[in-house]
Amino acid sequence: METVPEPGSNVPPKKDRLQTKKKKPRRYWEQETTGTAAGASPGPPRKRKRNRELRPQKPKKNDTSKKFRISKKPRELKSPRPQRSLSGAQDPFAGPAPVSVEVVQKYCRIDKSKELPHPKTKTRSRLVVAEAQEEETSVRAARSELLLAEEPGFLEGEDGEDTAKIHQADIVEAVDIASAAKHFDLNLRQFGPYRLNYSRTGRHLAFGGHRGHVAALDWVTKKLMCEINVMEAVQDVRFLHSEALLAVAQNRWLHIYDNQGIELHCVRRCDRVTRLEFLPFHFLLATASETGFLTYLDVSVGKIVAALNARAGRLSVMTQNPYNAVIHLGHSNGTVSLWSPAMKEPLVKILCHRGGVRAVAVDSTGMHMATSGLDHQLKVFDLRGTFQPLSTRTLPQGAGHLAFSQRGLLAAGMGDVVNIWAGQGKASSPSLEQPYLTHRLSGHVHGLQFCPYEDVLGVGHSGGITSMLVPGAAEPNFDGLESNPYRSRKQRQEWEVKALLEKVPAELICLDPRALAEVDVISLEQAKKERAERLGYDPDARAPFQPKPKQKGRGSTASLVKRKRKVMDQEHRDKIRQSLEQQPQKQEKAKPTGARPSALDRFVR
């Protein structure tokens, strides 16, 4: 069916839509395009001869040989097609990104070299699943290193120049404006000397003067949070789990203040405190006193967990191991003792110096400990079981204060001079041959601490507070879920709730925290031996009795349990009978001859 065009238009006739979309089937009387000669009349179509050889034959019902055929040729696996994107381009880097084995090993926390002796099938399957999950977690953590935008800083001299001769003014001129603002001096000579402490996020700074001046501020923006005078000598200051609470060791008792300077608590059981240390994962505040007691205060419930007598006189040198939360105390006889609230005696005693110990510091990995004594020696010890000195250096003037940075730099305060030594990396011990930086202050050093996540060293001295720039001292990247310096008030409150739920009990503090995840095979074997001695037989010596099932209602569960108990009791009776037979029998008293029998003789033993 065709439409007639309008007159005067040269538009060709439009075809029907149905005809353009679908062609009609050709009938046998229509003219063929191919295969017909010219002038030949079309006739009915001829029947095609079917080629039965090419047609597949159906297998018969009784014939099973064709139904199950085994091909001799191996089946070829098709190679996977290259993945294409929406634009059609191929991915030049198909599959997951390759990860270095060394980087994965750095994040691995399972030691596969140690195996349990004869683990059961269920235990083995659980261990396999745990190892697979740990390996996957390590690979993900290694791949996430690409997202770390910041890199650690460093300081290099030109043409072999000694970096110890570079002054703070030269570093301030070379860095950007934001980093230069982190170097400042607070002239507080009226209330010095000062002790200082940074919060865990590295955003807030608290300091206290020996003449009663206590202040807390956001040192990045220089915004003052609180400033008070307690009208009493201040021995030490310490932030608690957040910057909202501040512990101050005053001349008589321990006081707790908030970020507005309001006194919240006065702990009179902690008196004459000289040093403070806070364990963040255990919510414990450790105090060392002049009376020689080491006290652990649980700040979450406000109770004294342990009060240990060190029996070494006045305690004025104390630090903590960030790796295992063990407290290190330095004594006047040249020893350093390691303490845990679960033990009344020191875990380890190390003889470090010939004279008294003046300062102790432990790095973030828990592998190295630096000590300085009255013999003017500075030593670095290995804490991985040997407790032997790795390096020693004699100083012209003994170091009174020590501090480790997050990346292993060691700072020592000697009079009014601060020396900093650097090592090869984070886990290596610092090299004491040549100092990395040197700075002279306006007063004698009274406190040292590196700021977390910032290349800054805070120094408290008799003239006030000094903030030094130390390139390469801190970790450049922080965990936003653990220590976020930019968190809001709501985020801090949520973090406090989570931290309280994940609080580690004080009884789990030990030298090797990895031992908590291992099976104590020695104690397990000792318990089995004691159980066998108490029962008189080993219940695990042979396979337990398994009764055979019976018919006609006699194979119920109750009857099976009763038969098992009967056999077990019979074995127990046999053991007791044998033990009684082995014991020496008491000899009966001989009756005197000629005595008349009595009815009360049966009660005589």
Image: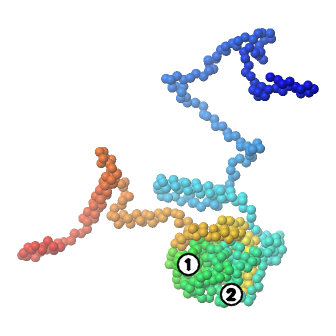
The quadrant of the picture occupied by the C terminus is: bottom left
Element under label 1? Answer: loop
- In the image shown, does 414 or 328 lie closer to the viewer? 328
Q: What residue sits 33% from the left and 64% below the top?
A: 536
Disc 1 crowd, CA 10 A, few/some/many (<14, 14-19, 20+): few
Residue 435 image position (x, y, % from top left): 74, 75
Residue 360 image position (x, y, % from top left): 63, 79
Residue 332 image position (x, y, % from top left): 59, 85
Q: Amino acid at mark 1?
A: Gly
Q: CA distance from mark 1 to mark 2?
A: 25 Å
Q: Which residue is mark 1?
A: 302
In the rendered view, does 324 fall on the left or right side of 595? right
Q: Quadrant of residue 574?
A: bottom left
Q: What residue sits 68% from the left and 71% below the top?
A: 489
Q: Which residue is mark 2?
A: 229
Q: What residue sits 71% from the left and 69% below the top?
A: 486
The quadrant of the picture occupied by the N terminus is: top right
In the rendered view, does 177 fall on the left or right side of 499? right
- Vertical comparison of 552 with 321: above or below: above
- Vertical comparison of 395 with 178: above or below: below
